[in-house]
Each structure stands twice: as structure tokens, then as C-alpha cells.
Image (spheres, helix red, strand yellow):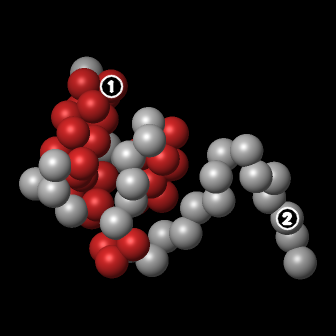
Amino acid sequence: MHSTALATAMTLYRSGTLTLSQAATRSGYSEKELTVALQRHGITVRESETTVRVAPADTPASAD
């Protein structure tokens, strides 16, 4: 069921029906986790909605 909720949330986010926050709540994911899932599925995250900045999955993390 969790994957169905994620797929539904991503579809509704892509269509503009849900905000990132609403889609995250509906999917059961955090906004950061949903942002990663959206990017992995080629769905553009609207920057006007989020302050979450996630590096692409193939970019290594670094510490200062």
C-alpha cells in the first residue's frame, strides 16, 4: 500500500493538485524523502514550495 500512496502522491504533485507538503503527508514520506523520490522519477520539484535542497543521487555528500 505504501508504494500506491507514493505513486498517487507523485501523480497529484506533478499535476499541481497537491503541494509538496500535502503530497509528502499523503505518501507517508518526509518532504526530503519525497523530493528524492520525485527527482528519481524525473518529476521537477517546484522550488517556490520548498526550502529542501537535495543533491542529485549520484552526487557524493561532503562535509566542511
Residue situated furthest top in the rendering: 1
In this figure, which residue is indicated by the disc labeled 2? 62
Q: Quick one: label 2, few (<14), some, or many (20+) residues within 10 Å?
A: few
Instruction: Give percent across and percent down for residue 26.
Output: 21, 46
Given residues 37 and 25, the one toward you in this image is 37
Q: Is residue 9 above or below residue 20?
A: above
What residue is at 22 percent from the left and 51 percent from the top? 13
Q: What amino acid is found at the position of numbered circle 1 in the picture?
A: Ser
**Could you tell me how far apart the alpha carbons at marks 1 and 2 are, in whole angstroms?**
30 Å
Q: Residue 35, percent across and down? A: 44, 54
Say which quarter of the image contains residue 48.
Answer: bottom left
Q: Is residue 33 above or below residue 64?
A: above
Q: Is 29 on the left or on the right of 20, as rendered?
A: right
Q: At x 21% / y 39%, what residue is drawn?
A: 11
Answer with mark 1 or mark 2, whichever residue precedes in sequence. Answer: 1
- In the displayed structure, does residue 16 sit left or right of residue 40? left
Provide the secondary structure element on which disc 1 rests: helix
Q: Is residue 17 left or right of residue 58?
A: left
Q: Which mark is residue 3?
A: 1
Q: Can residue 51 be seen by looking at this rendering?
A: yes
x, y (%) of residue 5?
23, 32
Q: Quadrant of the C terminus?
A: bottom right
Q: Indicate the quadrant containing the N terminus: top left, top right, bottom left or bottom right.
A: top left
Residue drawn at point x = 51 percent, y = 39 percent: 40
